């Protein structure tokens, strides 16, 4: 992903929060005549430190893992095998910026957005119990973040019946590209205008953008603290 220098964010916490808060990833895998692309649920393994603590200035995401699954009937699944390189695309909050918000002329409209591209290799999970573990962990993660902490115990027999149709995998991260386009190229007052406009919007992703923009320093540099990305998407 091409990321202009104004929109590069090296802070691992910012990137990790986009992944955690927007876990319906787009998996892209090379194929002929066109790549495979599938939207699928992805989670951080339960209890894992994400990203891992890096040493010697290395990218802390490298070597970290994610878990995902997709329908075995999907031809994309047949294109996957242990060692297959793929990209997981996580789209975060985004919103259109009208020139009327800037209060200056001339001006041009734009789109503020956040995106994280995770490059890595797949390890297929063939064992039925391990596959069930991925499904249960996915349910527990999503219920804890987006749901009502539903207890899946009473549905485990049903899970086992549908398990033959589930293809689970572990994704080992090799590289992470992130773009946070949050009006860093604008003057601080203009950026504040955009932030106020998003904060007052009825659209949840706009309000999430405003929270991110509030975490920028005066010069547009991301603050070091973990970013509260905000509410789950509507």
Image (cartoon, rainbow, N blue to C red):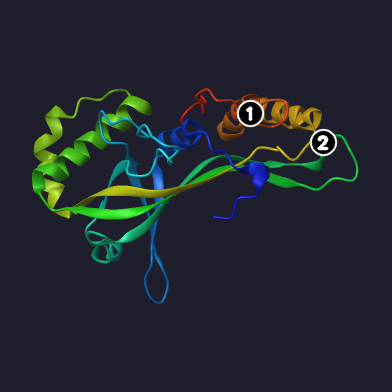
Q: Position of residue 173 (x, y in %)?
A: 35, 47
Report helix, strand or loop for mark 2: helix
Residue lying at 25% horizontally and 25% vertically, measured from the top left: 150
Q: Position of residue 165 (x, y in %)?
A: 17, 54
- In the depicted structure, whether residue 170 falls above or below residue 136: below
Residue farthest toward the front in the current orientation of the protein? 56
Ranked by sequence position, the earlier of labels 1 and 2 is 2
Q: Position of residue 107 (x, y in %)?
A: 85, 45
Quadrant position of residue 184: top right
Residue lying at 52% horizontally and 22% vertically, measured from the top left: 225
Disc 2 crowd, CA 10 A, few/some/many (<14, 14-19, 20+):
many
Residue lying at 38% horizontally and 67% vertically, measured from the top left: 30
Task: Say which mark, if any, is on residue 210.
Answer: 1
186 with respect to 9 (left or right): right
Report helix, strand or loop for mark 1: helix
Quadrant position of residue 96: top right
Q: CA distance from mark 1 to mark 2?
A: 15 Å
218 with respect to 134 (left or right): right
Q: Are marks 1 and 2 in contact (CB under 8 Å)?
A: no
Residue lying at 65% horizontally and 46% vertically, measured from the top left: 5
Task: Say which mark, if any, is on residue 57.
Answer: none
44 with respect to 28 (left or right): left
Residue farthest toward the bottom in the current orientation of the protein? 33
Residue farthest toward the right in the current orientation of the protein? 105
Residue beneath disc 2: 102
Count of labels in the image:
2
- In the depicted structure, whether residue 197 falls above or below residue 123: above
């Amino acid at each position: 992903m091409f990321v202009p220098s104004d929109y590069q964010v090296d802070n691992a916490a910012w990137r990790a929060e986009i992944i955690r808060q927007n876990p319906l990833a787009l998996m892209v895998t090379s194929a002929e005549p066109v790549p495979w692309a599938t939207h699928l649920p992805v989670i951080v393994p339960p209890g894992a430190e994400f990203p891992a603590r890096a040493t010697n200035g290395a990218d802390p995401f490298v070597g970290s893992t994610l878990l995902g699954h997709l329908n075995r009937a999907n031809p994309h699944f047949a294109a996957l095998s242990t060692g297959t390189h793929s990209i997981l695309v996580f789209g975060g909050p985004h919103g259109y910026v009208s020139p009327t918000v800037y209060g200056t002329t001339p001006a041009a409209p734009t789109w503020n957005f956040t995106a994280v591209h995770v490059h890595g290799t797949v390890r297929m999970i063939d064992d039925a119990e391990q596959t069930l573990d991925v499904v249960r962990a996915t349910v527990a993660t999503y219920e804890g973040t987006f749901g009502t902490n539903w207890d899946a115990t009473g549905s485990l027999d049903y899970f086992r019946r549908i398990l033959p149709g589930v293809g689970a995998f572990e994704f080992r991260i090799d590289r992470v590209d992130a773009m946070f386009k949050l009006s860093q190229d604008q003057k601080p007052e203009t950026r504040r205008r955009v932030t106020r406009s998003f904060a007052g919007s009825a659209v949840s992703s706009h309000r999430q953008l405003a929270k991110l923009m509030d975490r920028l320093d005066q010069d547009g540099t991301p603050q070091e603290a973990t970013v509260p990305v905000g509410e789950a998407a509507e």
